[in-house]
Image (spheres, rainbow, N blue to C red):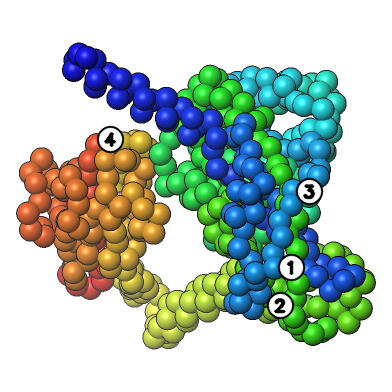
Amino acid sequence: MSLRGTPRRIVLCLIAGGAVALSAQAYHNARITSLKQLGDGRIEARVQAATTGEAEPGANEVAASFKLKENGVLQESLSVEKADAETGSRTVLLADLSRSLSRRQFADYKKAALTFVERLRPGDMVALVTFDRRVYRLVNFTSDREILKSRIRRLKQTGSRTMLYDAVLEAHKMLRDVPQQRAIVVYTDGKENASRVVIGDLIELFTANPVPLFVAGRYRSFSLKQMIRLARISGGDAFKAHDTHDLDKVFRYLGRLKSQDFRLTYASRQKPGSALDIEIESSLSAANLVRSYTLPHNPAASLADATKNTENSNLYAGSWPAEIRRHMPEILLSLIVILLIAVIIMLFFRRQEINVKVENTNPPAYVAPEDFSLMPGRKVAQTKAKLPIDYHHGWLVEKEGPHTGRKYRINWHNITIGFAEDNSIVIDDSTVSGRHAKIERQKQKFVLYDLMSEHGTYLNGKKLLRPKELNDFDEITLGRTKLIFRKSAATYERDPDEEN
């Protein structure tokens, strides 16, 4: 036997084993769809799981993959069986009509979406939601391919604003009560500038009631990373999509998604009216499935509707933080109006104070009309108001970078510059660190600091090794971005008497 062919055989065996593993992938997502008490006193839990694999586990493997705890106690009488799953799937396509995507990217998305609609299986239904400066349900759930293709072909980029988070929230509302296989698909660069909700609200919502979100993107921006995180939390996934071929692979992946329902029953020893904390551990889900439930006094009554109402009330009502979040736009608008009124009142009284200072000057001595001829060359001195300027500021002008020519005004004693969104000045340049540099005002001068940046900070072509004072027209280099510092000093109007 030749030893030269042995490593090749080992590599081939490893590849074959990997192919088998990929063909029988684990379940992708699982959730508890219903929880109720049967007539004989047993508790029934329905679990729905979604998978992309072709092979399904055997009955023994399925039974062994579930462990159920009631109030922390493992139930030995648990029985598991497969149930008939709902046929068909529900998918919401989110179409970004803003100009944050290029024309080519938008055309690629339309082409891939048309191919996806053409491959719909019997029973599959698709809804189309568009968003730019507003969110609009263009097509409700339908299986009519011609309507969907006609609406997709007519999509055009029209807006300059992007309500991405509000669109994801709208899709979640459309799918949160759907029992079938469901998914949200969005192709985006992650840019968001108009939504009423923030990413934290979506993370909390998708954690409490997960709906699989599939994100296809091209760039590695901070905002896209937030969407990728949301997709992983929801039980969905994120894909790199650089062209039509990549988008087509994403939609083909979604076309292979399948759902399977499992019926779990066990004998409960709790009395009617008792509260149950159900925790299901399974290999079909990365996290344990948790649901709270109260036993009815009538065991024969079905509690599916009660469970559904309890879940919705726990998510969206019953606590004052939820009420505050629901009315947050009105609260913010009221605060802005109050702030504007306060600023107007301050400016009004400030102007009145200045007018009083100007008018309260000593009146000139009385001169009789006949005495005016005695003073032909005398001029009456005019008193000018001295209006001090209260602050001292400067500018940074972007000489080279992603937004050449943009001006950044300095009105604070300390400002930070970097790629992260919590900086005073945000530079959209991947070569700039999250917190790159700092400018600090010290009396009548500005001092530049380097905040341990990855590529360093350069002042007039020299690397900044210690803090240095900035002069007018100094050039600051951060990565591939160059900024020009302009200084504007506070001045006071000179008194004419001082000139004499």
| Residue 274 visible, this orientation | yes
CA gap between label 2 and label 3 equals: 24 Å
Whole-number angstrom distance, CA of label 3 to CA of label 4: 63 Å
Q: Which residue does the numbered mark 2 point to in the structure image?
A: 276
Residue at left offset 34%, top offset 63%? 411
Q: Which residue is mark 4?
A: 400
Residue at position x 64%, y 19% from top? 111
User: Viewer-proximal residue, 274 or 445?
Assistant: 274
C-beta proximity under 8 Å, tags 2 and 4: no
Horizontal and vertical percent position of residue 122: 82, 27
Q: Secondary structure at mark 2?
A: strand
349 vs 265: above or below: below
- Number of labels in the image equals 4
Give, as a three-letter code, the residue at label 4.
Answer: Glu
**Residue type at mark 3?**
Ala
Q: Amino acid at mark 1?
A: Tyr
Q: Which residue is mark 3?
A: 83
Q: CA distance from mark 2 to mark 4?
A: 63 Å
Q: Looking at the image, which residue is at 90% across and 70% down?
A: 39
- Circle 2 packing at 10 Å, graded few (<14), some (14-19), many (20+), is some
Image quadrant for the N terminus? top left
Q: Are marks 2 and 1 in contact (CB under 8 Å)?
A: no
Secondary element under disc 3, as helix, strand or loop, is strand
Residue 82 to residue 20: above or below: below
Front in this rendered view, residue 283 or 318: 283
